[in-house]
Amino acid sequence: MSDLLARLRGRGWRMTAQRRVVAEVLDGEHIHLTADEVLARATARLPEISRATVYNTLGELVSLGEVTEVTTDGRAKRYDPNAHHPHHHLICTCCGTIRDVHPNGDPLSGLPTSQRFGFTVEGAELIYRGVCPGCAAG
């Protein structure tokens, strides 16, 4: 059973066939799919699943805190099931590949108290951009 499916079962989330397929599509390392990509993969597994069901399920998973929405290009939201492990993203500027990265140290340590303007900072999102080995070789 996937990490996401196990977390959802642990929460007592009602596991319909449609919800299970969406969770299975989101299973794995470095998953950052758009809603349309989730829909295409879910439809391949369960042809009768509807667009509304996929979008509603993604919204529910985000509301539950089991999946995070990531916007890396200012356009399409991507859905990341790695919601319980703090991480950043490394993005290829050529092909758009996204990888989760786990740099050492606290990203907030670089933000001096004087620059926090009284905010209680709860998190930080960092995006590293570069060219992946496949694009660099091509």
Image: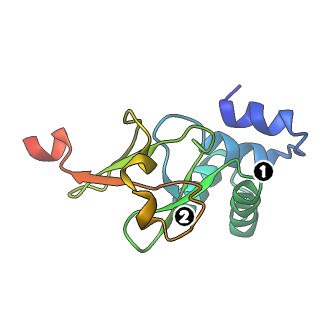
Left of 4 or right of it: where is 112? left
Above or below, 47 against 102 in this view is below
Residue 94: x and y, percent?
Answer: 20, 57
Q: Which numbered circle lies on residue 36?
A: 2
Residue at 49% in and 34% down: 29
Closer-to-camera residue (6/128): 128
Residue at 64% in and 50% down: 67
Residue at 79% in and 39% down: 8
Quadrant where the image shows the N terminus: top right
Amino acid type of the residue that numbered disc 1 sits on in the rendered structure: Gln
Residue 52: x and y, percent?
Answer: 73, 69
Q: Residue furthest top?
A: 1
Q: Residue furthest left?
A: 137
Cα gap from disc 1 to disc 2, whole angstroms:
15 Å
Report the coloring of the rendering: rainbow
Closer-to-camera residue (41/109): 109
Left of 2 or right of it: where is 77? left
Q: Residue furthest front?
A: 114
Closer-to-camera residue (60/20): 60
Residue that badge 1 annotates: 18
The quadrant holding residue 50 is bottom right
Residue at 50% in and 71% down: 117
Amino acid type of the residue that numbered disc 2 sits on in the rendered structure: Asp
Q: Which numbered circle lies on residue 82?
A: none
Above or below, 10 against 126 in this view is above
